[in-house]
Amino acid sequence: MSLRFYIGASGAGKSTALYREIIERSMEHPEQNFFLIVPDQFSMQTQAELVRLHPRKGIMNIDALSFSRLAHRVFEEVGEDARTVLDDTGKSLVIRKIAGNLKEKTTVIGPSLNKTGYVHEVKSVLSEFMQYGIGPKELETLTEYANGRGGL
């Protein structure tokens, strides 16, 4: 397996060259599966373009997948956890519900809850905390440091 970079200005034909190469390889090796990882908003457009460029107008062993679809596919194949994952809207609704229930107890989130984009920002911060392994202990240490009572 090799890594190849397609570099050039917008509209120079990088995507088309990549699609043509993948189509050619897929025809040479019909027993292999080929995957294109693309942003969510481009998966259908990429599939349509591959079909349009393919001489047989069909792509049986080529898949254009977003990262989230690839993750679902991997989990399906390896039999991992089948729980439903919340999308951004679902996460925002959960945060809004919890913050609404705790409105009187929270001095920061409560008053700002109805500001445009605030729940989205809270969701982003929580996602980053999870991504970087920041939990209650780390937040407590940071709070102590910020209040001048401790050191990192």
Image (cartoon, rainbow, N blue to C red):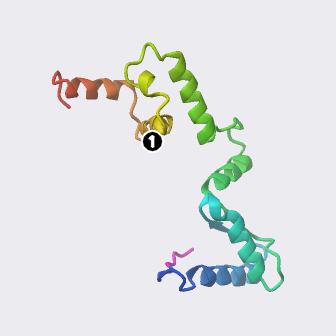
Mark 1 crowdedness (10 Å alpha carbons): few <14, some 14-19, many ≥20:
few
Label 1: which residue? 131
Q: Is residue 94 left or right of residue 10?
A: right
**Residue 100 magenta-drawn?**
no
Q: What residue do we see at 40% from left, 29% from top?
A: 135
Q: Amino acid at mark 1?
A: Gln
Q: Is residue 51 left or right of residue 10?
A: right
Q: What residue do we see at 60% from left, 56% from top?
A: 67
Q: Nearer the viewer, residue 89 or 137?
A: 89
Task: Give the quadrant of the N terminus.
Answer: bottom right
Start and end of the magenta stretch?
A: 1-5
Name which quarter of the figure residue 144 lies in: top left
Q: Tell me where residue 30 appears, x and y as whole percent.
A: 78, 77
Q: Does residue 42 lie above or below 57 as drawn?
A: above
The answer to whether any part of residue 34 appears in the image is no
Q: Does residue 63 lie above or below 98 as drawn?
A: below
